Every structure is written in C-alpha cells, then in structure tokens.
C-alpha cells in the first residue's frame, strides 16, 4: 500500500529535521520503503510517498520524528488505479480518455487553450 505522508515541521523550522536526517538517516523500520519526496518551496512541509504492507510500520517510524514533525498519513492509490476503481461507476460503455488521468498534474500550455 502507498501512503502520502504530509510532514509539517514544528515551529516552521526544517533545520532540526535535516540535521537529524544527516546524522541518523531516515530511521525507517525494515519493511517501510521510501519512494520519493517533495518539500514546499517555503521549507515548511515535506510530502513523502512511502510504501509498506503493514501500516504499523509507519507508526513505528513516526515515533522517531514526532518531536520535530507533525504528521498526516493518507493512504493513496495511483491515478491509474483510481481510474480502474471508478470506471464501473461511470456508466455503461464508459472508458477513460486517452492521455493523462484527471489527477495526473497540470495541463500543458497547449491543453489550456
């Protein structure tokens, strides 16, 4: 299962978080896999995509960081998986349009016109 982890740095301070990461690494238990991450331009939040079969592993990981970070954990699916899930509810003969699913990101300049 995939999880989007929204981290809000306590006190708006990313320095202690990055310091601990530099000194100790991610501190993730075996079985919790880091996929990718993005940090807001103002350095107040981090969005990490993590993967594991047992959600208790996320709780074990959070313990190492909760003094520095407030967490929101959201189970997520890929856009392709969402299309497959919603397709039966779209009605008879409904198929996904060619190209990107609706949550695949902002349209290109040509698509906006």
Image (cartoon, rainbow, N blue to C red):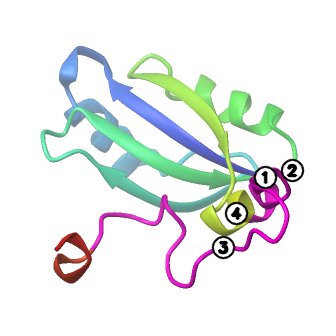
Seen at 75% across and 55% down, the residue is: 90
Callouts 1 and 2 close, C-beta under 8 Å: yes
Q: Quadrant of residue 58?
A: top right
Q: Mark 3 points at which residue?
A: 96
Pick the front one: 62 or 1 = 1
Seen at 19% across and 26% down, the residue is: 13
Q: Mark 1 points at which residue?
A: 1
Q: Marks 1 and 3, how far apart in space? A: 23 Å
Instruction: Please rate how many residues cluster around mark 4, counting C-alpha atoms within 10 Å: few if below 14, some from 14 to 19, many from 20.
Output: some
Of the residues under marks 1 and 4, which one precedes in the sequence? Answer: 1
Going by the image, does 61 lie left or right of 7?
right
Q: Mark 2 points at which residue?
A: 53
x and y, in percent, of residue 30 in the image: 78, 53
Seen at 50% across and 76% down, the residue is: 100
Of the residues under marks 3 and 2, which one precedes in the sequence? Answer: 2
Q: Mark 4 points at which residue?
A: 83
């Amino acid at each position: 299962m995939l999880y989007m982890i929204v981290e809000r740095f306590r006190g708006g301070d990313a320095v202690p978080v990055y310091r601990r990461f530099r000194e100790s690494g991610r501190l993730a238990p075996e079985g919790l896999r880091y996929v990718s991450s993005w940090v807001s331009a103002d350095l107040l939040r981090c969005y990490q995509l993590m993967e594991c079969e047992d959600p208790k592993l996320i709780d074990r990981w959070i313990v190492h960081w909760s003094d520095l970070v407030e967490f929101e954990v959201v189970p997520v699916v890929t856009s392709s998986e969402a299309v497959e899930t919603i397709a039966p509810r779209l009605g008879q003969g409904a198929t996904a349009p060619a190209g990107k699913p609706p949550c695949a990101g902002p349209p290109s300049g040509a698509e906006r016109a």
